[in-house]
Image: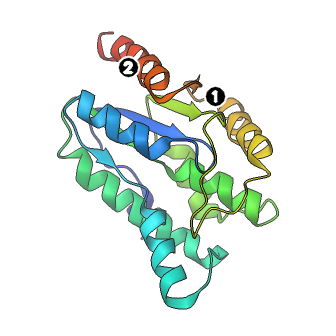
Amino acid sequence: MEEKYRQEPSNVLKVVLFGPESTGKTTLSEQLARHYHTVWVPEYARDYLQDKWNNERKTCEPHDLLPIAEGQMRLENKLTKKATDILICDTDLLETKVYSEAYYVGDCDPILEKYALENSYDLYLLTYIDIPWEADDLRDKPNEREQMFNYFKDTLEKYGKNFITLKGNKKERLQKAINHIDTLLHK
């Protein structure tokens, strides 16, 4: 039953956008997918939680995290088969783990934690908080951006993930990401 949280084997390079809310991850995912003529994996939690908000006026609760993780991996595994040499992921289970710990007093479901650490990506693009925060129905931590950024960065360091930090405007971020991805593609 836990297989639904596992990545299917693949030879494509996998890049994850990683960082706090409202830091340009989706915009950059779309830009990178266009640049590399490939597909990108959207953040499943956005649609899931927006539907929950629209229908119940409730935000994320701990029991939502495994369905979110399952949906994210279903999308990733499906789109991996459509990718060219590279797959751009707007998020991953490690990001879900960070949010679980940040919102639920350090708690993370053991199944989510297991696959957040087992699933493998070639590069994490950590998005910095120098992009203006934009409110929406789901975003709720405009005053905790630096704390959340540090939590994301500490997580990548703790688990030895290959990452770079992206700062600056959209053009600067895109160019830095392309430079690092091209290096990995041509190894």
Residue position marked by numbered label 1 in the rendering: 160
Answer above or below: position of 71 versus 163: below
In the rendered view of the protein, which quadrant contains the C terminus? top left
Q: Does residue 106 appear in the picture of this structure?
A: yes
Q: Does residue 2 appear in the picture of this structure?
A: no
Q: What's the residue at 67%, 52% (across, down)?
A: 98
What colour scheme has been applied to the protein in the rendered image? rainbow
Position of residue 110 in the picture relative to residue 93 (left or right): right
Q: Position of residue 166 (x, y in %)?
A: 56, 26
Answer above or below: position of 149 versus 54: above
Q: Nearer the viewer, mark 1 or mark 2?
A: 2
Q: What's the residue at 58%, 30% (across, down)?
A: 161
Q: Position of residue 39 (x, y in %)?
A: 24, 43
| Pointers 1 and 2 in contact (C-beta within 8 Å) | no
Q: Helix or strand or loop: what does disc 2 sit on?
A: helix
Q: Amino acid at mark 1?
A: Gly
In the rendered view of the protein, which quadrant contains the N terminus? bottom left
Q: Position of residue 78 (x, y in %)?
A: 24, 55
Q: Position of residue 109 (x, y in %)?
A: 65, 66
Residue position marked by numbered label 2 in the rendering: 178
Q: Amino acid at mark 2?
A: Ile
Q: What's the residue at 40%, 13% (across, down)?
A: 179
